[in-house]
């Protein structure tokens, strides 16, 4: 804002100019709108549910591309898919699932999700040991997609809605910030990271 505009804005505050006072209010409103837009953007970037949904979408896109690929491109896409899956699973197991396990209504669903992750890792390991052009590799690719789809459906349709209701908002914000921070780091390949210790079976009454 120029010195001339500032001067007339100051007049409007003293009641000397309605016209220029309107301009000042418009400037303030625009500034507030920009601040709110930035806050929404930052909130979206650290929203744990949005982060995980975006991961799910990225994995689905890679699997669709993988089904159409061949030769060297297939190997490159599979390596990218494997890294994406391992990163996603490791972050869920480090930051998201432990908090959900503390809630009785979610504990069984979380145990099932750990089991899904185990299945996905096992399929990926088998695929790494198979010929990319073999029928066995293709069968495992289809099994991987089915397992992933089932897992995503349970997370997005059952776990996420319940977590929104049952987990404190500040805790969810903290989880989102932790995952976003980890994603922002330049780290070793996710597949080489040590996996968290498997939880012991829950005791049932």
Image (tube, rainbow, N blue to C red):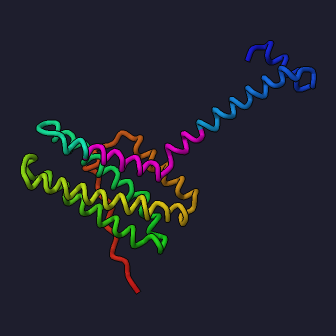
Estimate the x, y position of residue 113 in percent, counting from the top left: 34, 64
The front one of 98 and 28 is 28
Specify the quadrant of the image occupied by residue 72.
top left
Name the image quarter holding the C terminus: bottom left
Extreme-bottom residue of the structure: 205
Q: Quadrant of the N terminus?
A: top right
Q: 46 or 182, which lies in front? A: 46
Magenta range: 39-63
Residue 150: percent from left, percent from top? 31, 61
Residue at image location 64% in from the left, 38% down from the top: 36
Closer to us: 191 or 167? 167
The residue at the point 39 percent across, 67 percent down is: 110
Residue 99 sits inside the magenta stretch: no
Q: Hey, which residue is sitting farthest top in the picture?
A: 4
SS majority, magenta: helix
- Residue at coordinates 64% horizontally, 35% vertically from top-left? 35
Q: Where residue 133 appears, x then y in whole percent?
A: 8, 46
Q: How many numbered circles does the render carry?
A: 0
Question: Residue at (29%, 63%) from the top-left corner?
Answer: 116
Q: Is 50 above or below relative to 93? A: above
Drawn side of residue 78 relative to residue 20, left or right: left
Residue 68 % position (x, y)? 18, 41
User: Is 147 situated left or right of 133 in this image?
Assistant: right
Q: Is residue 203 above or below residue 186?
A: below
62 drawn magenta:
yes
């Amino acid at each position: 804002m120029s010195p001339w505009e500032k001067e007339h804005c100051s007049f409007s505050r003293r009641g000397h100019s309605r016209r220029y006072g309107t301009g000042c209010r418009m400037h303030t409103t625009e500034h507030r709108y920009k601040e709110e837009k930035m806050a929404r953007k930052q909130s979206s970037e650290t929203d744990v549910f949005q982060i995980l949904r975006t991961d799910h979408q990225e994995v689905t896109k890679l699997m669709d591309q993988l089904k159409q690929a061949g030769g060297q491109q297939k190997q490159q896409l599979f390596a990218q898919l494997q890294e994406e899956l391992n990163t996603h699973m490791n972050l869920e197991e480090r930051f998201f699932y432990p908090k959900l396990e503390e809630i009785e209504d979610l504990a069984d669903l979380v145990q099932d999700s750990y089991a899904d992750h185990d299945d996905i890792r096992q399929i990926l390991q088998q695929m790494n040991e198979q010929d990319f052009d073999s029928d066995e590799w293709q069968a495992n690719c289809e099994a991987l997609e089915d397992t992933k789809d089932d897992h995503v459906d349970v997370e997005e349709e059952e776990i996420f809605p319940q977590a929104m209701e049952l987990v404190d908002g500040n805790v969810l914000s903290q989880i989102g910030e932790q995952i976003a921070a980890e994603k922002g780091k330049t780290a070793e390949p996710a597949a080489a990271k040590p996996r968290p210790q498997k939880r012991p079976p829950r005791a049932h009454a």
